Image (cartoon, rainbow, N blue to C red):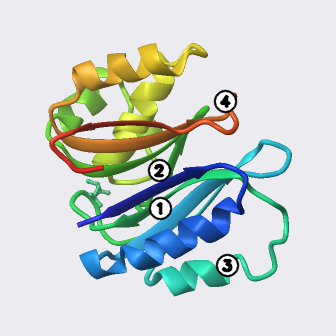
Amino acid sequence: MCGIIGYSGPLEARTILLDGLSQLEYRGYDSAGIAYFDSRSKIHVVKKTGKVSHLREAFSSVSDSSHCGIGHTRWATHGGVSDANAHPHRAGRVTLIHNGIIENYHHLTQEFHLESGLISQTDSEVAARILDLFYEGKPIPAIRQLTERMEGSYAFCIMFDDHPGEIYAVRSVSPL
Ligand code: GLU
């Protein structure tokens, strides 16, 4: 089962996210990733197959501060175990992590003509891309539109490029 953590506040977000993912390791996972706003409010995504310790190594020389971010340990259901399939997924102004299974993802891929633009094999990236299509600067109406179209189970944790410091979360069936 995957794990999700989000943090926004005065402390160093990267450290909290990585420590949080370490605490979630017992649930089992095949890859891990985090996304965070840097000190200039730009989102960075780092994700890798393998252990959280492997992900942590990627930050050994990063000193820039971060105060908001999301993290994920993945248990693959759609697509193999690869860096591209690891979460978070980026689509336009959307950065999203997902726990669960979107049962109608294939139908949605066709309906929204997403085939050629997908970078991963996951149902989760389909959700990220549809959310970006709906997004017109206001997160909550776009998330509502997204969840109206989702069938299956989901817990989403989402950041938007133009809303630094904010994390949006929504769930159905999957825990969050
Ligand atoms: N279905 C998603 C995937 O395969 C999420 C899996 C999970 O819950 O970790 O990437």
Q: Is mark 4 within 8 Å of ligand 1?
A: no
Sequence-wise, the earlier of marks 4 and 1 is 1
Q: Is residue 24 left or right of residue 117?
A: left
The residue identified by callout 2 is 119
The residue identified by callout 3 is 58
Question: Which label was assigned to residue 163?
Answer: 4
Residue 6, placed above or below residue 23: above
The residue sitting at 34% across, 66% down in the picture is 74
Crowd rating for badge 2 (residues with CA inside 10 Å; few <14, some 14–19, many 20+)? some
Callout 2, which amino acid? Ile
Q: Is mark 2 within 8 Å of ligand 1?
A: no
The residue identified by callout 1 is 84
Sequence-wise, the earlier of marks 1 and 2 is 1
Sequence-wise, the earlier of marks 3 and 2 is 3
Q: Are marks 4 and 1 in contact (CB under 8 Å)?
A: no
- Dot 2 lies on which element? loop
Sequence-wise, the earlier of marks 3 and 4 is 3
C-alpha span from label 3 to label 2:
22 Å
The residue sitting at 56% across, 61% down in the picture is 34
Q: Position of residue 146 (x, y in %)?
A: 34, 23
Residue 141, placed above or below residue 72: above
Callout 1, which amino acid? Ala
Q: Are marks 1 and 2 in contact (CB under 8 Å)?
A: yes
Q: Position of residue 57 (x, y in %)?
A: 65, 84
Crowd rating for badge 3 (residues with CA inside 10 Å; few <14, some 14–19, many 20+)? few
